Image (tube, rainbow, N blue to C red):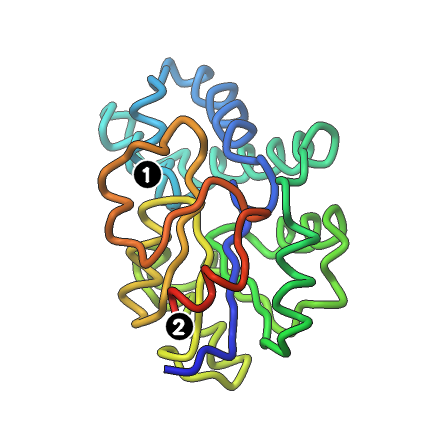
Amino acid sequence: MQLDTVIFDIDGLLVDSEPLWNDAAAEVFKLYGVNLTEEQYKSTTGLRTKEFVQWWFNYFNIGDTELKVVEKKIVELVLQKIESTGKVMPGVAYIFDFFHKRNFKIGLATSSPPELIELVVKMTGIGPYIQAAASAEDLPYGKPHPQVYLNCANMLGSHPTHCLCFEDSFNGLVAAKAARMKCVIVPHVTQQKDERFGAADLKISSLQNFGELHLNLVS
């Protein structure tokens, strides 16, 4: 199979934003008497903000009258945090240049809102490489549903089986595989031993570790 397209997730993969999402959620949730453990946060990593909020509000029997308000508060707060303290992950410039030199079509597929895509593209300087960016914010279903990946492939004019995805979360991995795409997983250092990542075509510790040998392995 000839791979000619690469699609990247954003949160936790291109920028170290997952802790900032957790911080923002913790600040807002505290107003409603909710305190999540680290394991609880991990279990919903990769979901859209509205699904994340709905899941935990249902779990704690808070009701749904404030869902949209809470979602908006969290997104606004996390955008502020990423812009002020967010860090670009190691290897981002390298990996985009790697695929650009090999004439791959390059896209982004994220559960996050378009505002975050714009912010991260600006922070990382990857704008010249990006040919399509898809957000699952307004789709009927977000990751682990594959639609956002299928949409991105369609925007790029690529067949799903010709696409390679880079992800950091299990929900993202499931979405990529459900779209019939190859997937390289780059887990957060705290989740390196998660056995569920065995479902990926390849697991690496950092984007900067990916090379020609790895591309041949997944092709």
Residue 53 is situated, as x and y percent measured from the top left of the image, at 38, 36
Task: Quickly name the residue at label 1.
Answer: 54
Dot 2 lies on which element? loop
| Amino acid residing under circle 1 | Gln
Name the residue located 50 percent from the left edge and 54 percent from the top edge: 9
Tell me which corner region of the image, top left, top right, bottom left or bottom right, holds residue 90.
Answer: top right
**In the depicted structure, whether residue 40 falls above or below residue 149:** above
Name the residue located 47 percent from the left edge and 33 percent from the top edge: 70
Relative placement, left or right, of 184 versus 5 is left
Name the residue located 52 percent from the left edge and 59 percent from the top edge: 8
Relative placement, left or right, of 126 versus 57 is right
* Of the two numbered discs 1 and 2 in the rendering, the one whose residue sits closer to the viewer: 2
Instruction: Give the label on residue 219, or none.
Output: 2
Name the residue located 30 percent from the left edge and 23 percent from the top edge: 39
Q: Residues within 10 Å of mark 2 (few under 14, many from 20)?
A: some
**In the depicted structure, whether residue 64 falls above or below residue 180:** above
**In the depicted structure, whether residue 208 falls above or below residue 87:** below
Of callouts 1 and 2, the N-terminal one: 1
Residue 202 is situated, as x and y percent measured from the top left of the image, at 36, 54
**In the depicted structure, whether residue 43 falls above or below residue 158:** above
| Amino acid residing under circle 2 | Ser
